[in-house]
């Protein structure tokens, strides 16, 4: 029997910024990270650690995206706004009010022969019944925009709050997921454009494996899906969060991802992380590795051996896990497939001067004959 390949992980660098990171993107040369924080949007030199604040929102910044082939940076915030910033002129260029509540997540894509796109997910959580199930949305809360002009191209409605949104690799589909474990996928070539606010999703699932009604200390809905992405072929949707728990204050649900197929005949099939391979804690970030058929899941560690782990896209098995000693909110692989960028936060110190936002650079790779690969 062939011996399983062993992996190793090593922190290459840690840079700290003034406040926690909720949004993260990279410059085309991968030398600069643009981060959305509690205090606004800033740029971080990944070689020197130099940090420069750029501009602010009226609340926390939930997403940041570098628009391809332009000088533009676009960001979303808990103030319900999209903001564009001209990096060449170093000044704001446009602001759009998207929602009267939080924009929870921002996604981006570059469809073939079209302008780049961004998608926003929003929605206020208002109790709708005795068990605090959310009240239905009073308007569209999954929206697709032209990333250059800010034109609204598509908008859809699902049960709020919609906490995660993603594009398929070719940009022809958008997926979203909410607090209650609902997952929806829309084909953007479908009818109606921005006027199709109530068009039903082309694929949808409901999973109770990420959410529960708290019965200890706090009687409310807890959990939900916090991250969503597509497989490289666009035929599967992967979501992450935390398994159900009865004590909302404990945060001790299982670390969990699930995968659903868009392929006819497989639409009802579900795969998920194996309970004997994971620990406890909320998983908030997913990253696809385009070089080797793996993906990563990251978040907070409540109990176990890792808060970031690499899994096989083929069979879902855990390949390697490690601790970052931080809460990870954003994760991505660099183009080399062996370097990971992890953004998040450290425990906040009582010292007012403590910089508790963090960007970690990790090398994650297989070991060949006892020596690091590459």
Image: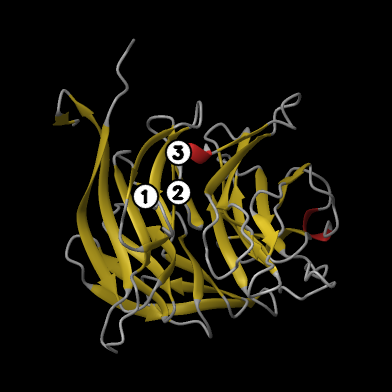
Q: Where's the C terminus, which quadrant?
A: top left
- Above or below 370: residue 341: below
As measured in the structure, the alpha-carbon distance from the residue carrying label 3 to the one carrying label 1 is 10 Å
Q: Quadrant of residue 205?
A: top right
Measured as percent of width and height from the top left, residue 152 is found at 70, 63
Task: Say left or right for 332 vs 160.
Answer: left
Q: Which mark is residue 306?
A: 1
Q: Residue furthest left?
A: 371
Question: Is the C-beta separation of discs 3 and 1 under 8 Å?
Answer: no
Q: Residue 279 carries which label?
A: 2
Q: Residue furthest front?
A: 216
Residue 27 visible? The answer is no
In-front residue for pair 281/113: 281
Q: Quadrant of residue 123?
A: bottom right
In-front residue for pair 172/8: 8
Task: Say left or right for 254 vs 355.
Answer: right
As measured in the structure, the alpha-carbon distance from the residue carrying label 2 to the one carrying label 1 is 7 Å
Disc 3 element: helix
Question: Is the C-beta separation of discs 2 and 1 under 8 Å?
Answer: yes
Measured as percent of width and height from the top left, residue 128 is found at 83, 72
Residue at the disc numbered 3:
277
Disc 2 element: loop
Q: Which residue lies furthest to the bottom in this view?
A: 352
For label 3, the crowd category at 10 Å Cα-Cα, with few meaning under 14, some 14 to 19 and many 20 or more, is few
- The image's colouring method is secondary structure
- Above or below 9: residue 354: below
In-front residue for pair 95/177: 177
For label 2, the crowd category at 10 Å Cα-Cα, with few meaning under 14, some 14 to 19 and many 20 or more, is many
Question: Is the C-beta separation of discs 2 and 3 under 8 Å?
Answer: no
């Amino acid at each position: 029997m062939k011996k399983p390949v062993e992996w190793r992980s090593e922190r290459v660098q840690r840079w700290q910024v003034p406040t926690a990171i909720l949004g993260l993107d990279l410059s085309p040369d991968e030398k600069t990270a643009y981060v959305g924080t509690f205090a606004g949007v800033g740029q971080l030199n990944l070689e020197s650690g130099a940090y420069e604040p750029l501009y602010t929102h009226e609340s926390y910044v939930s997403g940041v995206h570098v628009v391809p082939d332009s000088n533009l940076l676009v960001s979303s915030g808990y103030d319900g706004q999209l903001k564009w910033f001209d990096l060449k002129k170093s000044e704001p260029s446009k602001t759009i009010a998207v929602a009267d509540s939080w924009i929870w997540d921002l996604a981006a894509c570059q469809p073939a022969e079209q302008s780049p796109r961004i998608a926003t997910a929003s929605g206020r959580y208002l109790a709708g019944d005795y068990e605090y199930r959310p009240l239905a949305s009073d308007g569209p809360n999954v929206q697709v925009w032209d990333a250059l002009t800010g034109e609204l191209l598509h908008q859809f409605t699902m049960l709020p709050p919609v906490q995660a949104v993603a594009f398929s690799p070719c940009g022809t589909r958008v997926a979203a997921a909410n607090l209650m474990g609902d997952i929806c996928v829309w084909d953007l070539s479908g009818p109606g454009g921005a006027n199709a606010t109530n068009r039903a999703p082309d694929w949808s699932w409901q999973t109770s494996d990420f959410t529960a009604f708290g019965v200890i200390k706090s009687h409310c809905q807890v959990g939900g899906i916090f991250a969503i992405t597509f497989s490289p072929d666009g035929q599967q949707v992967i979501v992450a969060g935390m398994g159900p728990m009865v004590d909302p204050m404990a945060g001790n649900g299982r670390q969990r991802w699930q995968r659903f197929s868009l392929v006819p005949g497989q639409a009802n099939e579900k795969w998920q992380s194996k309970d004997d391979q994971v620990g406890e804690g909320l998983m908030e970030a997913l990253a696809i590795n385009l070089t080797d058929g793996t993906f990563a899941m990251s978040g907070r560690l409540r109990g176990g051996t890792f808060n970031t782990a690499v899994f096989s896209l083929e069979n879902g098995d855990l390949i390697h896990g490690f601790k970052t000693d931080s809460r990870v909110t954003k994760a991505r692989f660099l183009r080399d497939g062996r370097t990971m960028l992890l953004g998040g936060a450290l425990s906040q110190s009582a010292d007012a001067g403590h910089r508790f936002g963090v960007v970690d650079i990790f090398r994650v790779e297989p070991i060949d004959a006892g020596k690091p690969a590459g």
